Structure formats: structure tokens, C-alpha cells
Image: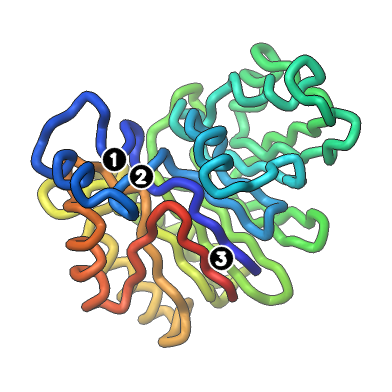
Amino acid sequence: MEILFLGTAASEGYPNPFCSCENCQKAREEGKKSIRLRSSLLIDEEILIDFGPDIVASANRFAKDLSKVKHILITHGHSDHLFFKNFEYRNPIFSGSFNELFHVDLIVPDKLGSVLKENVDLPKISLMSVEPFRTLHLNGYIIYTLKAKHTSSYNETPLNYVIEKNGIKVLYAVDSGKLLPESLEFIKNNIHHLDIVILDATMGFNKKYEFHMGYDEILETKEVLLNQGIINETSKIIVTHFSHLHNPVHSVLEGIYLKENIITAYDGLIINK
């Protein structure tokens, strides 16, 4: 399984183009890994998680042809994770190879499905509205839906996902607070073990907010997963979705998390498992 981080920033990007705070200024100076687009993940060039306003920029930045994508998973309806206009770019008026596009399974949280039906044309897309704690079998992948601790735009139930292929299991719990007890219970009873855990790091080091995670919550979550036998010393823990308001530039972040054996994601990071 190949995992590519197309974007690793929170809603406003990092740096925020309208901000001259110390972190944004240092990010512009440091460049490279400190320049972050809005969060999105690509797995095996077949599964895309979240479809925000930076998807065109991030796909072009890493020379990715998203016409190969077969499944799009949406965590929730906030516009940095679901940008309706993106769907138009698949349509014949914009795509010169529409006839060759794969038919896509679009998986969204419950009530978000009806919103999309009313507002977006979805040619060659099968829309699937799903509740938490479901198991889907798609093209050699198993997708597990978990309830996320986060806010919504359309009264939908935000989701975390576990993606399994050939026995490798990846948790994507991003733009989310700490794992809910019922989600932990589902993982323990139905998924058992996680090889890769990708966690939200929005709040960093200087503020608490129940619908996002920061450094302390990440360490707490790692400890809980270890104690429950869901991860072990071979499992990879990766943090992403960084806000410039609460997180320093990449070089500093990397040093902090490395001490805890946690990987700091950056745009373009590839994980193979």
C-alpha cells in the first residue's frame, strides 16, 4: 500500500496568505516542507480521502493523474475537505478524456448525500451515504467507517475511516477530536490491529479544543492504542492537519514528534507498507 499526503494543513493553509504571524513568516523563509496545502490523502492512486479546494494544486504539484481514482471518501462537509466545484472538473465540458474516466464510488457521511444530490452534477459517480460503524468491500479494499468527534456543515455525522488492503490497516482520523469510546470499541472488536495511524494535530501546543487534537491528545491516544493492543512497536503513528496558529514550522515539529517516535507529515510524504 502506498500512501501519499497531498496536503497537510488546516483550513486556512500554512502559511495563511493573509497572515504575517511568526510561524507564517518562518514558513515562507523555510519553504519546502513548511509550505502546506489543505489536507488530502491518496492511497495507491485509487482512493482519495477528502476533496478540498487545493486538490488541483496538490495533484499538479506531485504530478498525479486523479482520473485513476476509483473511490473518494469524504470525512465531513466543511469546505476545506469537500469543495463542490471540484466535481465539475470531471465533467465533459472540462475533461477531454471523460469517456476514459473510471466510475467513482463517492462515500460521504449520511445526510451529506442528499446535499450533494441537490447541488452537484455527478456523472460516472455512484453516491453512497453511510452511517458510522459500517464495513464496505470495494475493489479489493475494506473500508470501515467510524464516528468522528467533530462539527458539521450539513448536520451530517463526521467520519474517521480505516482502510484495509491485503491485511494492512490504516486509520485516518483527521480534522477530529480524540477517538470516541464507541469508535475505539469498534476498532478493538472488528479491526483488532492498526498498522498505520494518521491523527489530527491542528491544535499543536498552545490551545485546547474538543473537536481537534494537539500534542497532548496525540500522546494520550497513542498510549490508549498501545494499552489496548490495537497498535504495537511496529505500527507507524503519523500526524497531519497543522494550523499555523498552534504549530511551529516543519523542522521544529519534526524534532518534537521524533522524540515520541511519531512521524510529522508534510505535503508529498509517501509511506509504503
Residue 60 x/y as whole percent: 57, 40
Quadrant in the rendering for residue 123: top right
Q: Amino acid at mark 3?
A: Val
Q: CA distance from mark 3 to mark 1?
A: 25 Å
Q: Is residue 174 left or right of residue 157?
A: left
Q: Earlier in the sequence, mark 3 or mark 1?
A: 1
Whether the residues at callouts 1 and 2 have beta carbons within 8 Å, the answer is: yes
Residue 196 x/y as whole percent: 50, 70
For the point 9% across and 41% down, the residue is 22
Q: Amino acid at mark 2?
A: Arg
Q: Quadrant of the N terminus?
A: bottom right
Q: Earlier in the sequence, mark 2 or mark 3?
A: 2
> Which mark lies nearer to you, 2 or 3?
2
For the point 71% across and 68% down, the residue is 165
Give the answer, above or below, for where 36 lies relative to 154.
below
Helix, strand or loop status at disc 3: strand
Name the residue that disc number 2 marks.
36
Name the residue that disc number 1 marks.
14
Give the answer, above or below, for where 36 lies relative to 141.
above
Give the answer, above or below, for where 97 lies relative to 121.
below
Name the residue that disc number 3 marks.
170
Q: Which mark is residue 57?
A: none
Q: Is residue 247 left or right of residue 107?
A: left
For the point 52% across and 64% down, the residue is 270
Helix, strand or loop status at disc 1: loop
